[in-house]
Amino acid sequence: MNKNHPPGAQEPVRLRVAKRPYRGKATFLDRWIGSELAKRLAHTNIVLVLWDGAEFGRIGEQGPRVKVQDRAGLFRLILHPQTQLAELYTAGRVDIEGSLLDMLEQGARTIYRNLTPRPWLNRLSRLSWGTPSERRSRRNIHHHYDLGNDFYRLWLDNEGLQYTCAYYPHEEFTLEQAQLAKMDHVCRKLWLRPGESVVEAGCGWGGFAIFMAKRYGVNVRAFNISHEQVSYAREWAKREKVADLVEFVEDDYRNINNRYDAFVSIGMLEHVGPGNYEQLGSVIGKSLKSGGRGLIHSIGRDRPAPLNRWIRKRIFPGAYPPTLREMSDIFEPSGLSVLDVENLRLHYAQTLRDWLARYERHEDTVRDMFDEEFVRAWRFYLAGSAASFVAGSVQLFQVVFARSGWNKIPMSRAPVYAKDPIDQERLRIRSVK
C-alpha cells in the first residue's frame, strides 16, 4: 500500500484475480464465446475486441470498444458478465476504448430490458443481509466512509461534502449549487421554522445539519456511526459558529432518544436493511412530537432486487435499495402517513456524472493515495451507478410523512416548488476550509 494512504482509513480491498495474459491467436472456442457475448449486446453499438484483435458486434460503428486481454477473462465474462466485467476492468484485464459511461449506460439498458424477476433470490438476499446488527453496520460504514476525508473532498461539492443526490432545478447549475438546492428542497418539504428541533439519522460530514441550523435557525441533533465524519462535522460546526445549535452524536440511529419536531434521513436507509425497517419506524414514531413530520431520502428500486454483487463486495458492503412497498414497513406499523413521494432519479444521474468528472480530474492524486486498482474500481463504480440511474433500474425516492391525522400541512406543493428554489445569496459558493 502506498505510504500516502490516509492514516486510520479503510484499506481498499485487494483483488485476487490472477493476471494470466494470453497473447496467442484466439481459438474457435474463444471466437464463439466472443460472438455469443456480442449477441447479448445486439441493441448496442458496443464492439468486443479479443487480445489478438478479433472483433465482434457492430464493427465499424463509432461506439465503445471493450478489449479483453486474456482467455481466462473471456471465460469469466461469459459466465458472470455483471460481476466479472467490473472485476476484470479493475484488475486491468479489460480496457474500455471510448466512453466508459456510454458503454455502461448501453449495457445497463440491455440488462434491465432482459431482467427476469427471481423472487427466491430476492428473499434469500434479504435473509443474508437484510437485518444488519449495530456491529455489522459499523463495519460496513467504516469500509466505505472512512477511506479518508481528503479522498472524498477531491470530487464531492466544495460547499458541504454532500455524498447524496443533488437537485438541479436549472440545467446550468453547478454541483455546488445543486447540492445547496437539494438541502433547501428538503427543508421546504419539512416546513422548518426557527426554533424547532430536528433529529437527523446518518449525517455524513455534517453539511446538511449545519445548513439547517444556519439557514432555518433550527436545533439539530445528528446521529452517525462514522468516527471520521463525526469528528470532521464537530470541527466544522465550531468554525461556522453553530455548535450551540448542532450536536453531532457518534451513535447508531437505533439509539435516538428525546422528541423532535422533525425527523430527516438522507442517504442512510440504504444501509439499514429491510429487516430493520419496522424498528426504524418505531424509533421515528417515538422521537416525533404530536405535530412531528419527517423525510427519508433513499436510493430505491421499482421491484425487489439485490444490489450488484460487485458493488456489495468491493464498494458498499451491506447496501440494499428498497422498493416503495418495502419502505412502507417503516410507516404503516408506527402510525405514520405518507404525504408526498418524489422520484429524483435523473437528478442522481447528473450528480454522479458531475462526481465522475471531478474524480477523473484527480485520478493521479487518488493513485498516490491508494493504487491503480483502487482508481479503476471507483471510476467503474461512479460510472456504473450513473448508468443504472439513466437506464431506470435504480430510483431516488424522497418520501415525506407525518403522524396520521396531522392536518397542519400546506394545501398545495407551491411552497416547495417556488420559481427559484434558492435565492442568489444562497447560491453563493464558499469553500470548505
Image (cartoon, rainbow, N blue to C red):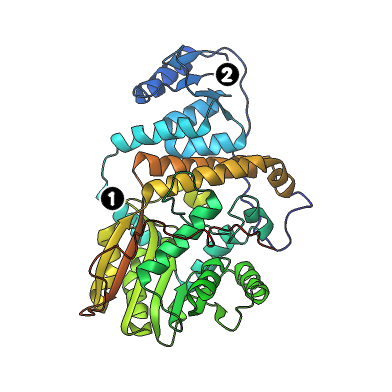
User: Which element type, helix, strand or loop, lies under badge 2?
Assistant: loop
As displayed, is residue 222 above or below residue 66? below
Residue 81 badge:
none
Question: What residue do we see at 54% from left, 62% from top?
Answer: 425
Q: Quadrant of residue 320?
A: bottom left
- In the displayed structure, does residue 32 sit left or right of residue 138? left
Find the residue positioned furthest to the left. 405
Say which label, 1 or 2, has the lower sequence index. 2
Screen quadrant of the C terminus:
bottom right
* Badge number at residue 51: 2
Q: Is residue 299 visible?
A: yes
Q: Quadrant of residue 247?
A: bottom right
351 lies left or right of 320 = right
For badge 1, the amino acid type reads Asp
Residue that appears at 58% across and 66% down = 205
Q: Is residue 373 visible?
A: no
Q: The residue under label 2 is which amino acid type?
A: Trp
Q: Relative to the observer, which residue lies in front, 174 or 139? A: 174
**Label 1's element?**
loop
Left or right: 407 in relation to 127: left
Q: Residue at x 60, y 57 (%)?
A: 429
Q: Nearer the viewer, mark 1 or mark 2?
A: 1
Looking at the rendered structure, the number of numbered marks drawn on it comes to 2
Q: Residues within 10 Å of mark 1 (few under 14, many from 20)?
A: some
Residue 27 position within the rendered picture, expressed as x and y whole percent measured from the top left: 50, 13
Q: Could you tell me residue 38's position as x and y percent? A: 40, 21
Instruction: Name the residue that disc number 1 marks.
Output: 302
Residue toward you, 232 or 66: 232
For the point 43% across and 38% down, the residue is: 82
Q: CA distance from mark 1 to mark 2?
A: 39 Å
